[in-house]
Amino acid sequence: MKPVLKQALSGIRRHRLQTGVVFVIAALAITVGAMGGTLLVQTSSPYDRAFGELAGPHLLVTFDGRNVGRSAVAATAALPDVTASAGPWATAGIPFEIGSHKFGLGLLARDDPGGNLDRVQVVQGRWIGGLGEIVVTRSFAIGNHVSIGDRITSLGSGDKPVLTVVGEAVDIDPSTNRGWVSSGELQSLTPKEAQQGFEMAYRFRSAATRADIRADVKAIENTLPAGAVTAYASYFDFKDSYDFNNSLILTFLLAFAALALGAVAVIVANVVTGAVLASYREIGILKAIGFTPRQVVMVFVIQMLIPALAAAVVGIPLGALAAKPLLDAAADAMGLPPPSALAPGVDAVVLLAGLGIVAAAAALPAWRAGRLNAVTAITVGAAPSGRWSDSLHGRLGWWKLPRPVAVGVGDAFARPLRGALTAIAILVGVATLVFASGLYSAILKFNDLFTSANYQVTVSRLGGFSDAATLDLLQKQTATQLVVGERELELALPGQVDPVPARIVRGPSAQLGYRLADGRWFSGVDEAVVGVVLNPYKWHVGQTVDVVLEGRPIKLHITGTCYCFFSLTLDWSTLVAVTPSAEPTNYFVQLRPGANADAYVKSLFLAQPDFLAPQVVGSGSGFNIEGALDGLVTALAVILSAIAGLGVFNTLLLTTRERVRDIAILRTLGMTPAQVTAMVITSACVLGVVGSILGIPAGIVLYNYLVDAMARVANFTISSSSFAIAINPLQLGLVALGGILVALAGAVLPARWASRGPVASVLNIE
Amino acid sequence: MGPSGSGKSTLLNLIAGLDRPTSGRIVVDGMEVAGSNEADLARFRRLRVGFVFQFFHLLNNLNVFDNVLIAAQLAGGPEATARVRVQQLLNELGVAAKGRQYPAKLSGGERQRVAIARALVNRPAVLLADEPTGALDSHTGEQVMKLLSGFNLRGQTVLLATHDIELARRYARRVINLRDGRLVGDAG
């Protein structure tokens, strides 16, 4: 073992540049690997992870304080099917202002964020320490630019108490405008006429289906006076919300992580294989002095593993650091606690996989060389094959290319395997970038399609304020152009356990401008539009489906498919035919051109601070998906370019070293330094062009395949063909040009060394 | 002429502009070699000198014809004329039949003939030959020397470095002796 180790260490010392290249490429690859692996693990099933970490409940129930007391609510914990519970916590909707910005918060009086169920996790600042302090949801703080230390004024009571924001927190409930105060605080903040209530969290023995949840709610309702339960939300509702709100960023992160891992594996294998292939001559010499084939393999494996191990020491922490902002951004977008970027299991797998790839990439060619006899290994290591250049040079002569260019073209594939592996490295980089930029454009387009509806304000009506009064108030605002009422209901399906969520709209809903993927908007009773997502039964245009609306069976005719996050949208006339007294609970307001949505919301607050909750559309989340994706695509482009560029550098370095004698001869024959540079640059250019040209169709195929696969996973009824135009030719051209430029950048130093190296000393040593 | 380490190869390398002198001047065919830049030296080597090495130094990935042709192509000029010149030299040196073969398939003598053809293809002012028979058996070495001598008799200046006194006596018109990098005799 000693001579093997000694030879490996001396190999590292002698090939410092080569070792340096392996170290840098392995470090970049392991960084991407650790980053990708961490993203892959920490962002998959975010809801399930958060549900576990926060001890999520099956059901959150809100009770009306006017109809039921705290002790009766607390007694529901003893129901036979309840396995765990938390609360009751007093709750109230309180209007606040900070500066000139007014907003409503659903407050919960809670002294302890912990417990065995429905825990609240403080992600910034601290928990409430006493009176005068408030903790708000992370998503609310981001969306409303509220920071720790800010002082917010309660408008609920006459003396307008002021609270200091001491923390930002997350829990399993994805709704945004919420906060926590101490139990002694809530009473003094609550308006006298406002609805007070309680909230309680439960887990049940049977909660596997929505039907189970409804049965559990029924059991609670049965023990309490009528009207005690005002609302409930189950873990299905939360999960649905997470799933379709976050499928975009998650699919991108997952696809990126998987691709990055594949790309770096190919590139590392290429570099290490190239380094060992270039050492055939040395392998022959080792065998000639008595090394066994196994020892030869060990020498090269150790020689490559040492820089790879050093690379892992640097790359794994760097990968975790690089993943952290993305994980935080994704968690912020979901209102979930940021997961740790330290994933020891992932790091161990990345370390083993990285070292395994390096060891295999070194061992295979070394094993092949170790089996050759010493003289053959020395001969094979000395000269590229002649047959290749025979046909190639013949053809190039026919094309009348300048001689240095022709020699450079031939050199690109003088060692076909090495040339092919380098071209593959560029191909993988280009294909990944084509895929990433395509998906990036598709996500932006997707985002655009789903946010195309043309209304600027939503208003939720709380109890105590009638539909007529609300409509009257909205119509009186001079900025109001159009009001569409909305109510969300669940439609039962005959023979199916899980109902389908539906949205029933009143007024000229067609004018809201939802984009249709297919068909037309509904025009009357018993017609509906189905969403392209959340369409579990794959309903299509022209189909008539049997549903149960408010207990009455009806037949719905599907007239169109729209880019909206709802299974079904139908006209108000359909609901009125079943329940004539039905009223909307939400209102979509389209403002006149030039009207200011913030000012509109403020004026509604002033007019009705307690029972209406107006909100500017899109103000609920401060997460900038474009910014996050921009950063991700840029990071991906930089890292893959660096890896591919170093791959080309490595190949040309090996080639120029191997051909140092030939280059010296050519210079003796009168090749100028510029011609030598042109020759080496031509080699790089050929590799870059081949990799880029093949990388583009490979990227498009990959894009179509993965987008289709993701669409299937997400239950989309649209295919990648809907996003085909997302990849524009200019983008493709730029990515291809980038691949070639990266190859050229990798060639600069080897070309310089080749054109300026010594001639006489090379030729006089034989 | 001189023993190993006397400076023969260094002198030829300096004349060809492959090495640079630490002091002094080198003028070849009226051109100041020592002070020229790399690009000028490359053009100088293309047109004014041809180099024959002890170990041939053919390009292994080119066939015989292309090994000679590449020097002509680097010098520029019509391709067709260059091809005719290459063919003529290969005929003259007796390796025309090997034109499609690669250096690895040739004998030492054949390789050196190809190297001579390559050195002469651009009609250089001076042919530099560094121990051209050093890697050949005596019979083959004799053939190579006869070829070089023949070119010399037809007007080609040949500057040949050797440590073989017998060779120098038989073929050289002028013998310059070197020892430890210094000129110690000039039997002009």
Image: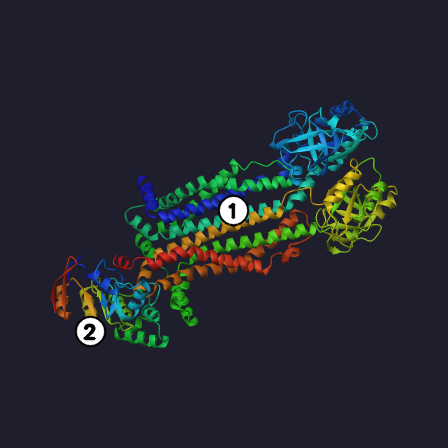
Q: Nearer the viewer, residue A429 or A178?
A: A178
Q: Are marks 1 and 2 in contact (CB under 8 Å)?
A: no
- Above-or-below relation of A225 to A490: above
Asked whether residue A499 is in view, the answer is: no
Q: Which residue does the image show at 51% across and 48% down from the upper left?
A: A262
Q: Residues within 10 Å of mark 1 (few under 14, many from 20)?
A: many
Q: Amino acid at mark 1?
A: Leu
Q: Secondary structure at mark 2?
A: helix
Q: Which residue does the image show at 35% across and 66% down from the upper left?
A: B62
> Measured from the top left, where is residue A50 in percent x and y?
63, 35
Residue underneath mark 1: A261
Would residue A596 be found to the left or right of residue A342 on screen?
right
> Measured from the top left, where is residue A442 in percent x and y?
63, 53
Q: Secondary structure at mark 1?
A: helix
Q: In the rendered structure, the residue with mark 1 lies on which chain? A: A
Q: Nearer the viewer, residue A506 or A692?
A: A506
Q: Nearer the viewer, residue A579 or A188?
A: A188
Q: Which residue does the image show at 76% across and 36% down from the upper left?
A: A211
> Measured from the top left, where is residue A269 in percent x and y?
45, 49
Q: In the rendered structure, the residue with mark 2 lies on which chain? A: B
Mark number displayed over residue B152: 2
Would residue B166 be found to the left or right of residue A268 on screen?
left
Q: Amino acid at mark 2?
A: Asn
Quadrant of residue A213 within the rendered picture: top right
Count of numbered circles in the view: 2
Q: Residues within 10 Å of mark 2 (few under 14, many from 20)?
A: some
Do callouts 1 and 2 point to residues on the same chain? no
Q: Quadrant of the C terminus of chain A?
A: bottom left
- Above-or-below relation of A156 to A294: above
Disc 1/disc 2 C-alpha distance (Å): 66 Å
Would residue A365 be found to the left or right of residue A324 on screen?
left
